[in-house]
Image: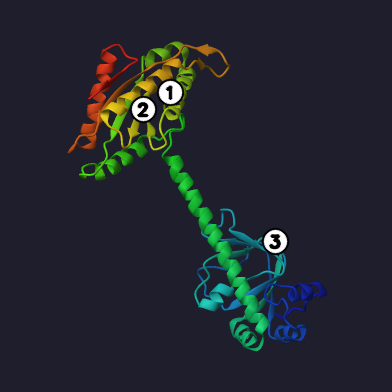
């Protein structure tokens, strides 16, 4: 069905992305060979399931562009004067996105054969197409970078312990395997792992309640994090137990760092959510330098046995293997 253009729609076309700076007489010649389509909300203009042979210029209304599921937020929206469909026309592939009318809308439909005729005859049309394509590529690139940023953010959140903000056991297991992948190389620097846990934590929890226990765990996590060097990493190993990975560190330096962490936790006063004072907590620590040929399990067992000796010796101290 051929529909007539309103005066405002003619002005929109003259100032549209595709027809900007193109002679009005040339535009009028094109319009005689075009069709106007009217779409109601939720009607699909383009989809990845169907080949497209048209470039559409939005005359009125608004369209939403979706990549993937349509129940998610749209990638972009198109309003009067903008065009869509040029990518699939130029590369003869199915559209990569789904374009859906968000409100009652009208579009001018230009067949691809007409587009090529116009490009051959009008320098401005070719220039406008290049501009549209470059803008579209920029938007797509920005969307890709944003998607990658969100993905990296989600992956990082998946590696963090929600209570302490330190890395979690999932991250630690992967990090330990990565450490051992190069640990036996002749030129590999020494590495140390520290296992530590909160002394008498069950008794603290039973006496002051689980919210106070969470305060204590957050305090330990913060004290440990603040006491490390830039290349060191700490993780919540499980419950009240934590692990610290020290790169380029031998046993002697590892003990020094562990003693510093022990003193930092001991010296910090605790307060509950209402600002009331809580008893300070202490930690016991076991230090183990990686030995050539050890597995992850053996390395952890070495640190765990040192931690056990620290507890047996009275807690609030450091032992090393």
Asked if 95 appears above or below 277 in the picture, the reply is below
The residue to which callout 3 is attached is 103
Residue at left 70%, top 64%? 79
Q: Secondary structure at mark 3?
A: loop
Q: Are marks 1 and 2 in contact (CB under 8 Å)?
A: yes
Residue 190 x, y percent position in the rendering: 26, 36
Sort mark 3 into few (<14), some (14-19) or many (20+) by Cα contacts within 10 Å.
Answer: some
Q: Quadrant of the N terminus?
A: bottom right
Q: Secondary structure at mark 1?
A: helix
Q: Considering only order in the chain, which callout, 3 or 2, is on the residue closer to the N terminus?
A: 3
Q: Secondary structure at mark 2?
A: strand
CA separation in Å, label 2 and label 3? 55 Å
Horizontal side, residue 55 vs residue 21: left or right: left
Mark 2 or mark 3, whichever is nearer to me:
2
Q: Which mark is residue 242?
A: 2
CA separation in Å, label 1 and label 2? 9 Å
Residue at left 33%, top 24%? 256
- Name the one closer to the observer, 15 or 305: 305
Residue at left 64%, top 74%? 56
Horizontal side, residue 268 vs residue 188: left or right: right
The residue to which callout 1 is attached is 220
């Amino acid at each position: 069905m051929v529909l007539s253009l309103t005066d405002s729609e003619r002005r929109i076309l003259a100032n549209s992305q595709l027809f900007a700076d193109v002679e009005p007489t040339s535009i009028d010649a094109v319009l005689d060979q075009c069709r106007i389509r009217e779409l109601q909300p939720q009607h699909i203009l383009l989809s990845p399931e169907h080949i497209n042979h048209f470039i559409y210029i939005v005359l009125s209304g608004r369209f939403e562009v979706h990549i993937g599921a349509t129940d998610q937020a749209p990638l972009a929206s198109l309003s009067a004067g903008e065009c869509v469909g040029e990518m699939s026309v130029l590369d003869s592939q199915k559209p990569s996105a789904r374009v859906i009318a968000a409100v009652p809308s009208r579009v001018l439909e230009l067949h691809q054969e007409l587009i090529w005729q116009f490009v051959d005859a009008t320098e401005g049309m070719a220039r406008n197409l290049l501009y549209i394509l470059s803008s579209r590529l920029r938007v797509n690139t920005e969307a890709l970078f944003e998607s990658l940023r969100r993905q990296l953010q989600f992956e990082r959140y998946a590696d963090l312990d929600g209570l302490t903000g330190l890395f979690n056991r999932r991250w630690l297991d992967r990090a330990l395997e990565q450490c051992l992948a190069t640990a036996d190389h002749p030129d590999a620097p020494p590495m140390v792992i520290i296992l530590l846990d909160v002394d008498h934590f069950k008794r603290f929890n039973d006496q002051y309640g689980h919210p106070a226990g969470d305060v204590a765990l957050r305090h330990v996590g913060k004290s440990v994090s603040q006491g490390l060097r830039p290349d060191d990493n700490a993780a919540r190993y499980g419950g009240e137990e934590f692990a610290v990975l020290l790169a380029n560190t031998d046993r002697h330096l590892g003990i020094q760092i562990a003693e510093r962490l022990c003193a930092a936790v001991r010296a910090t006063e605790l307060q509950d959510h209402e600002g009331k004072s809580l008893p300070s907590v202490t930690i016991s620590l076991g230090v183990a330098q990686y030995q050539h040929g050890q597995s992850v399990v053996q390395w952890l067992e070495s640190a765990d046995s040192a931690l056990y000796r620290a507890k047996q010796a009275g807690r609030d101290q450091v032992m090393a293997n």
